[in-house]
Each structure stands twice: as C-alpha cells, then as structure tokens.
Amino acid sequence: MNILDKIIAHKKQEVALLKKEVMVEKLVKSPNFNRTPISLKKSLLKIGSSGIIAEFKRQSPSKGVINNTASVIEVTKGYMEANIAAQSILTDLDFFGGNVLDIMQARSVNDSIPILRKDFIVDGFQIVEAKAIGADVVLLIAACLTKEELKNYGQLAEDLGLDVLYEVHNQEELDKLNLDHKIIGINNRNLKTFEVDLEHSIQLANQIPDSCIKVSESGLSDPRIITGLKEYGFQGFLIGENFMKTENPGLACKEFINQIK
Ligand SMILES: O=C(O)c1ccccc1NCC(=O)[C@H](O)[C@H](O)COP(=O)(O)O
C-alpha cells in the first residue's frame, strides 16, 4: 500500500469515529459558521497580489519533522506581515502533526486573508467542519476522490460559501474535473512516491483554460521559479517547507516575496 492509500484509509476511520462524537447540528451552531468566508479567488486576482499561499506545516511523510516549535499564532502574524495572498494550514494530526485548533488560533489573529484547510477530505462532514473552525477554502485532491465525489463535495463547499482548491498531479486526474472557472492546484509532488518535479506544473498548465486560476504546489524554494511559473499563467504558489524549515517562517516568507520580480 502506498502512503497516500494509507493516509486515506486512516482518514476514513478517523472521520467515521469523529462523526459519532460530533454532530453536524453542533458544528452549524459555532460562531464561525455565520461569518462570510474570504475569497481565495479574489485574493489571488487582486492587483499587486504576491500569489503566495504560505503553509503552516510541522511535519510531513516525505520530510519527517520540519518544525515542531513554531507557534501558529506567531507564524500567522509573520506571514500576514509578509503580504501573503493566503494561508494554508494542515489539520491532519497523524501524518502532519496538525489539528483543527491550529486554524481556530490562526483565525483569531487573521481576519483579512483566506485560510485553506489543508487535509484529506473524504467526507462532506469535514467540509462543514472546515467552515465551523473558520476556514475559507477546502482542498479536494483528485488522486483520492472519484469524479462524482469531486463534483458533490465541490458543490457542498460552494453552497457553504467556501472556495475550493482542486488538486491534480497528472492529466488523468485533471480529466476527472469540470474545469469551468475553478481554482486548480498542480501538485509537483507525487503523493505516492514523494518525487517532486516542477515539470508537472509546466506540462499541465496549457491543459487548463484561462477561466481557471492556476496554482503551483510543492517544492518551490526559489523566487526566480515563481517568476518563471508566472510566464506559464500561474497566479498562485503554495509553499510550505521552504518557510517552515527556518527559525522565523514569517521573515523567510517576507524575504522570499520581496525577491519575486
Ligand atoms: O509533503 C508531503 O510529504 C506529503 C506527503 C503525502 C501527501 C501530501 C503531502 N504534502 C502536502 C502538500 O501538498 C504540501 O504540504 C504543500 O504543497 C507544500 O509543499 P512544500 O512547499 O514542498 O512543503
């Protein structure tokens, strides 16, 4: 079994247990459920947007521990000061060391920049939960969902006012999506082998219509690459490890953004 299959099998069990403990009725009563989500689309399209979606990531299956001392509140403040377009926060505990409280804490100091709940969505419950904890955007990964699930979960998120980042790694996954006006993330990392290759972004870019917003994800560590990817029509750039591996992720992010031409 590859790591992605393991994560998904584990996630399905985790969500099944959680649904026994937490009722959807309780989630919809949370104060965040009434707030109007901040649009990722608008943030990425804003004139002068840095396009950077900066991630809070303590550990990962490919790299092990990246940073287990950083405070989500301090990193959020630093990222905001760096002029990011959005923030991504991993909420998976067992493989990434994250949790839903990380988003709630980040939200308490961030009321202006969209927050992406980065997790492995396998059930609509997690989308309702995302809204309840204060997220603005959810991730739907084509590698672990059927065409029908992508459509239904996408619709649920939209009905709740949340934006969706649809993630693909290859043409087969892209073919599962109706591409109309969506935000499409091309993950340069193969989630089954961990191999990272920017060619995935470059090769898939011209298969995506201009009505979509293109986001390049993973393995981005040089501001010059961002300038190059912009030439291929990318407007968003999701970066985790490159910032989180430093002592001061906010400062690293600020310096990175200042170097983008
Ligand atoms: O990062 C991993 O090892 C990983 C393994 C299995 C599934 C997902 C994984 N990462 C999620 C991501 O897509 C990244 O956190 C995100 O794109 C940022 O990547 P990076 O800038 O390389 O930290």
Image: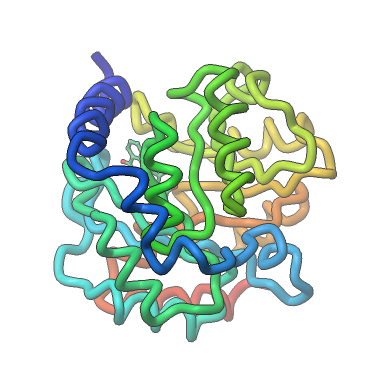
Q: How far from the left and from the top, in percent, is residue 233?
A: 77, 50
Residue in the image at 30% along x and 78% along y:
73
Could you tell me which residue is drawn at 28 percent across and 64 percent down? Answer: 102
Number of numbered discs present? 0
Q: Observer-nearest residue: 57 or 197?
A: 57
Quarter holding residue 135: bottom left
Residue 168 image-quadrant placement: top right
Q: Is residue 115 above or below residue 94?
A: below
Q: How is the image coloured?
A: rainbow
- Locate residue 2, reporting x and y percent: 27, 19
Quadrant in the picture for the C terminus: bottom right
Q: Residue at x 35, y 53 (%)?
A: 27
Q: Is residue 214 above or below residue 110?
A: above
As drawn, which residue projects farthest toward the bottom? 81
Q: Is residue 44 left or right of residue 194?
A: right
Residue at 72% x, 64% y is 42
- Left or right of 10 on screen, residue 30: right
Position of residue 104 measured from the top left corner of the image (x, y, whole percent): 33, 67
* Ligand 1 positioned in quadrant: top left
Question: Could you tell whether 62 is left or right of 121 in the image?
Answer: left
Identify whether 63 is placed above or below 85. Answer: above
Find the residue positioned furthest to the top.
Answer: 1
Q: Position of residue 255 (x, y in %)?
A: 48, 80
Left or right of 121 on screen, residue 140: right
Q: Residue furthest right?
A: 210
Looking at the figure, which quarter contains the N terminus? top left
